[in-house]
Image (spheres, grey):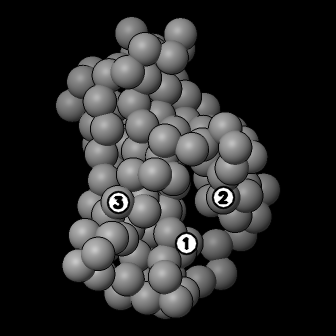
Amino acid sequence: MTIVYRVDGGSRGNPGPAGYGVAITTPEGDPLGSLYASVGIQTNNYAEYSGLIAALRDALERRAERVLVYADSQLLVRQMQGRYAVKSANLRPLYDEARRLAGSLASFTIEHVYREANREADRLANLAMDEATGR
């Protein structure tokens, strides 16, 4: 089974109240579920990685054969692709965990998309940040 994860994270203040959102679909776009959560006072990049880790854990629980991740964070995508180094000590443990989880999957692909193609994940990330700030 192939599962598509659209991941987004954000922070109001950077650092500030942060959260992630993950929209889960079939390759045809049929909804399979969603994930979102606050991650406390963090940076947007921390929130992006937290969303990716949540998606990868979900994929392992579902025993997905093939996982496609779309994210609008070029930093996240390029670091996971090995094109950018991870220089932030704050992100290194998250990166290491994401790499470990991705390596446990039979097939993992991550690609950059523009924000317009990631609206549901963005909505979910904003919902997480709203809940964290009591909005």
| Relative to 114, residue 125 above or below | below
As shown in the figure, which amino acid type bears the numbered disc 2? Ser
Q: Whole-percent x and y of residue 118?
A: 60, 43
For marks 2 and 3, the one nearer the N-term is 2
Label 2, label 3: how far apart the Cα atoms are? 18 Å
For marks 2 and 1, the one nearer the N-term is 1
**What residue does disc 3 label?**
127
Helix, strand or loop status at disc 2: loop
Q: Quadrant of the N terminus?
A: top left
Does 83 sit left or right of 129 as displayed?
Answer: right
| Relative to 113, residue 133 above or below | below
Q: Are marks 2 and 1 in contact (CB under 8 Å)?
A: yes
Q: Quadrant of the C terminus?
A: bottom left
Residue that appears at 54% across and 87% down: 14
| Relative to 38, residue 124 above or below | above
Q: Is residue 107 in sight in this rendering?
A: yes
Residue 59 occupies which quadrant of the picture? top left
Q: Is residue 91 in sight in this rendering?
A: no
As shown in the figure, which amino acid type bears the numbered disc 1? Asn
Does 112 sit left or right of 121 as displayed?
Answer: right
Helix, strand or loop status at disc 3: helix
Q: Whole-percent x and y of residue 70?
A: 60, 39
Q: Are marks 3 and 1 in contact (CB under 8 Å)?
A: no
Residue that appears at 43% across and 88% down: 16
Residue that appears at 64% across and 73% down: 86
**What residue does disc 2 label?**
73
**What residue does disc 1 label?**
45
